Amino acid sequence: MLAQTDNPFTVDPWAFVPHPEVWLLVSFLVGAYIYMVRVIGPTAVGPGERPVTTRNVRAFTAAIAILWVASDWPVHDISEDYLYWVHMFQHMALSFFVPPLALIATPAWLMRTIIGTGLGYRTLKWFCHPVVAGVLFNGVAMLTHIPLLVNASVGDGFWNGALHYGLHVAVVVASLLMWMPVVGPINEFRIGVPGKMIYLFLQSVVPTVPAAWLTFAEGSVYDAYETPIRLWGISVTSDQQLAGAVMKLIGGMYLWAIVIYIFATQFAKGFGTRQDLRRPPEPPLTTEDVEKAFAASTPVVEDR
């Protein structure tokens, strides 16, 4: 929301605005993770096993840091009141960066402890099916670009704020489900390497529609961002074009980079060796080898 200065007719875009709800969320997530790892973890793994790896901890730290930066001042306030391209980058962080890191940070025993083996397991497995997760993810992405919802979510009222955070929750949940077949901690929920590459490529195709709409739209698409205060001198049209570029170019390049990485690590490694059609050199034949072959052979007895 806008921060007022001493002059009631001016607004300071850079005035600090506290967001205690974000601080509480981050504190809760950190505390819950530490509790699960230190209290429940030792009883869930075998003797001598570590509840989490260094990779888990690093991924969790990165996920929390990105979540905090994307949800707190000044990113949250600029994205809500001034620039839609910052709002788009915020959604990018909450859908493409935080969810895969959060899943990498979650060990298998922790996820299985949370979902159990009954209804929760079966429900999550159904939602993590690549078709279901992909459709849900892209459906939420399209929903969050509807002008009516966007304009309503950036208002100053209580229900406007509730809608804003509700849409963020929907984005994160749908993104977690989308990333589960790729980097989820449950083995049976993941798909094969070729499937991952095709799956991630398809996730970069659908955002082309709203990205093109924002890039080539004439006039203001979202009335809430047509404000007289133009941060950094960026016009409404340029703001929308930057938002489209963030959505298509940065998001697409990010997904394609992962596809290339998967290919390089899974297929390209040792590719030249596997494609060599020449027979490998045979070891030289020695007298000892000949004697062993004669000793192991069965004498031929002729019929009389």
Image (tube, helix red, strand yellow):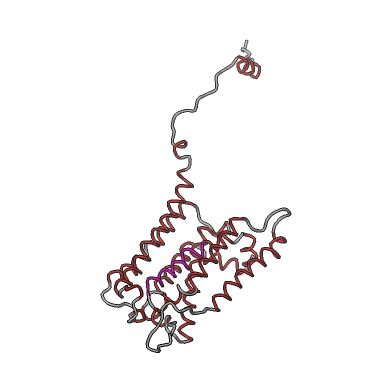
**On screen, residue 17 above or below 206:** below
Q: Is residue 103 magenta?
A: no
Report the quarter where the N terminus lies: bottom left
Q: Is residue 97 magenta?
A: yes
**On screen, residue 229 above or below 279:** below
Report the quarter where the C terminus lies: top right
Name the outermost residue toward the left: 218
Residue 109 appears in which quarter of the rendering?
bottom right
Residue 258 appears in which quarter of the rendering?
bottom left
**On screen, residue 108 above or below 84:** above
Q: Residue 36 at what x, y percent from top left? A: 66, 66
Q: Residue 137 at what x, y percent from top left? A: 45, 68
Name the outermost residue toward the bottom: 8
The one nearer the camera, 28 or 2, is 2
The one nearer the camera, 162 or 116, is 162
Q: Residue 273 at what x, y percent from top left? A: 47, 36
The main secondary structure of the magenta stretch is: helix
**On screen, residue 253 above or below 175:** above
The stretch of residues the image draws in magenta is 83-100
Q: How many marks?
A: 0
Instruction: Write the residue at 63% across / 13% down.
Output: 301
Q: Residue 66 at what x, y percent from top left? A: 50, 66
Name the outermost residue toward the front: 6
Residue 236 appears in which quarter of the rendering?
bottom left
